[in-house]
Amino acid sequence: MGYTPHPNPLPARGEREPSEREAGEGCSADGVWRHLRLLPETLDDPSLADASQGSAIVVRDSTIAWLGGESHLPREFDAMPRHECENALVTPGLVDCHTHLVYAGDRAGEFALRLAGASYEEIAARGGGIVSTVRATREASEDGLFEASARRLQQFLDEGVCAIEIKSGYGLDLATERKQLRVARRLGAAFGVTVKTTFLGAHASPPEFAGRSDAYIDLVANEMLPALAEEGLVDAVDVFCERIAFSPSQTARVFDAAKRLGLPVKIHAEQLSDSGGAALAARYHALSADHLEHLSPEGIDAMRDAGTVAVLLPGAFYMLRETKRPPVDALRAAGVPIAVATDHNPGTSPMLSLLDVMHMACTLFGLAVAEMLASVTRNAARALGLQATHGSLGVGRAANFALWELDSPAGFAYWMGGRPIARIVRQGRIVEVNR
């Protein structure tokens, strides 16, 4: 079938943003989606993928009611509308399981400093890094944050993303963390996409707590997190456990608070050094441990035993010009599920394309094509606790899938900078693809 690349421009800043009523709208996807190519590894029941003939998916009441070889289509669906798919490759809707999408401003100037030789730690010591984004985010209005974040989110949705995690962590005070999480909830409602919110109050110490990180952790664990959880704004809790952020003992205090509230945890760990953060998180049965360039064998064993997903972030690896790759071979050998995400953030991974990250996961980290596809579907959904609803195609699941103008999944690793997307069904609605 081949693929002809399309341009992929950023939306103009002056474009009118969709209203919260308009953005989630789309035509119902109910009907029989014909002449598809199903991939066994993306199905709850792999035996239903029939390579010898065209396959079909039946959507009824926004849910997958049936799928399999088209010649076996039950007669009960004969009267339903037909959607001709022209032999398109179909996958579950993609899942981006690690983003910091809601923030104000950018840090292009800091990138120039890094190009000139400054390290991540040096920039942070000068008052840059996370704290510079905190200043901008505190000053922004909620509506202003929504508008800026909506432009970014649209890029992901146009590439077939049907579920996305959005972290806070650029407020570092209760009012601004609340503002970020409220915007994340609004984005999910406005765009008809599954958004999982993660409270990352323990991202860095704010300027007003300089030299008092223990006191700040007390505030995060004992005041901020309980208040935000009570308001229904938190789905999971994350900590940046690193020498420039918080220690394992401080991380454990936040995790203890999350446990008391019945919230799952995640961790930024082993990005710049081996702090033992992944093993710590595994003791709390963390959903995921993310980055992991310096992950130890002990950390791998702990993650395996806990069922914690390894989330790899090639965008940050590339942007920071790192040379130590995550231990993919050891993770693979141990059977630790591997997910891949954009880590979209203004400082170390201003990445607006999960498709580009899929390519980078193969070329930079050595993932095989099948592993790469699982890393943004089945395993990414698991990293968000969404494995029952997202990341796979099966009867009874919500209709979240994407049609691709590709001959095979190898095209995801092959094409750079393009969008081989044909059609998207998200939450049972057909959504327009903006090319």
Image (cartoon, rainbow, N blue to C red):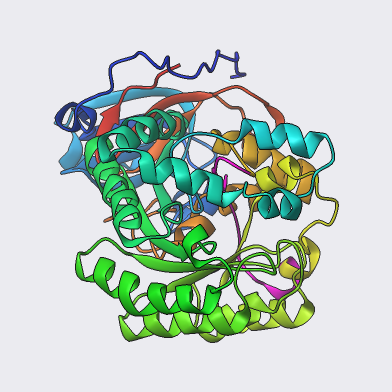
Quadrant occupied by the N terminus: top right
Which of 310/137 is in front? 137
Any part of residue 55 in sight: no
Q: Which residues are magenta?
A: 332-347
Which of 71/396 is in front? 396
**Location of residue 225 in the rendering, given as x and y in whole percent from the top left corner:** 33, 71
**Location of residue 123 in the rendering, given as x and y in whole percent from the top left corner:** 70, 48
Looking at the image, residue 40 lies above or below residue 428 = below
Looking at the image, residue 351 lies above or below residue 129 = above
Image mark count: 0
The residue that appears at 59% across and 71% down in the rendered structure is: 211
The residue that appears at 24% across and 24% down in the rendered structure is: 18
Say whether residue 333 is magenta. yes
**Location of residue 202 in the rendering, given as x and y in whole percent from the top left corner:** 49, 67
Quadrant occupied by the C terminus: top left
> Is 264 placed left or right of 274 in the picture?
left
The quadrant holding residue 57 is top left
Say whether residue 212 is magenta. no
**Location of residue 226 in the rendering, given as x and y in whole percent from the top left corner:** 28, 75
